[in-house]
Amino acid sequence: MSYTLRQVQTLLTKPELELFQASRANANKDLTERQLSSKITRSRTLRAKYRDLYQRQTVKTQKGPAAARRPAGNDNNRTEVKAEVMQEVLGRFEERLAKLQTTAQKSAATAATERTAAPAKAAKKAAAKTATKTATKSAAKKALKKPAAKAAAKTTAAAPRKAAKKAATKAAPKKAAAVKKTAAKPVKTAKSSKAPAKKAAAAPAKARKIAAASAEVGGNAAAAARGAVPTRQPAAASRGNPIKAQPVNKKIKASGQSKTRAAQAKRDSR
């Protein structure tokens, strides 16, 4: 059983009562391990003291001359209760010390794990930093290589064009001189061939004039359509009928005469 403060106040002395108050749950939370260990030793010595005293008192009461007059153990009840109270106080101090030690061990274990994990974390961070640095360097190198490669490709692609341009510029004066020479030669030939060309152009014109004159004189249908006066028409008829003498009427008459002649030829052929 656990004793209350009211039960203990009449039994314990002032230092023992202070020790009892310090062992209570709300009070022993503020104690350190060193303080707890000192109070544990104090309560242990008091427990041993009251236990030994209780044993000696019980022996005396059982063997003394007053044993026949008193009931056994009534005088030793206070000593027994004190021993039990000190045992309870000692148990509370030991329990609190065990809790502090377990928490301290856990904190030490966590600190040890953190210490052991710290180099691994540092190594990981260093590896990540080096990887990022190498990646950035390689990306920068690639970025620098791409423009250089493009420039080289452009220069290689432009080299044949430049060579062709140079060759064209070199050959241009020669071609121009050759063209000038070839252009100068036909000019001379053209001057010499002007007379035959004029003769050839004048020949068809003369032929047309001759054909027109013969048609006008001959009086065929084509000439009559062009307005030629046929030779068969008498001059008196043309003079007496001015309407017939008009070119349009002459054409109509000529076409009618040609139609009658064609019809007469068909009849004769039958």
Image (cartoon, rainbow, N blue to C red):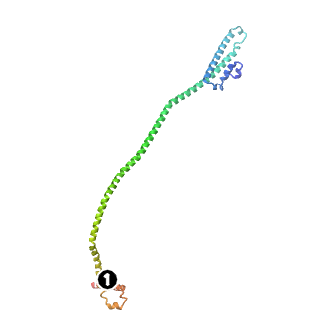
In the depicted structure, whether residue 156 falls above or below residue 208? above
Quarter of the figure with the N terminus: top right
* Location of residue 19 in the rendering, given as x and y in whole percent from the top left corner: 66, 21
Viewer-closest of 15 and 134: 134
Residue at 54% of width from left, 29% of height from top?
Answer: 111
Viewer-closest of 137 and 248: 137
Viewer-closest of 254 and 115: 115
Which of the 4 image quadrants contains residue 21? top right
* Location of residue 156 in the rendering, given as x and y in whole percent from the top left corner: 36, 50
Which of the 4 image quadrants contains residue 71? top right
Q: Which residue is mark 1?
A: 223
Judge from the rendering whether residue 72 lies leftward or rightward of residue 223; answer left or right.
right
Determine crowd level at label 1: few under 14, some 14-19, many 20+ residues with C-alpha closer than 10 A: many
Dot 1: element: helix
* Location of residue 50 in the rendering, given as x and y in whole percent from the top left corner: 66, 15
Residue at 31% of width from left, 58% of height from top?
Answer: 171
In the depicted structure, whether residue 116 falls above or below residue 142? above
In the depicted structure, whether residue 170 falls above or below residue 241? above
Residue at 39% of width from left, 47% of height from top?
Answer: 149
Judge from the rendering whether residue 181 lies leftward or rightward of residue 140; answer left or right.
left
* Location of residue 113 in the rendering, given as x and y in whole percent from the top left corner: 52, 29
Judge from the rendering whether residue 16 lies leftward or rightward of residue 263; answer left or right.
right
Which of the 4 image quadrants contains residue 38? top right
Query: The residue under label 1 is which amino acid type?
Result: Ala
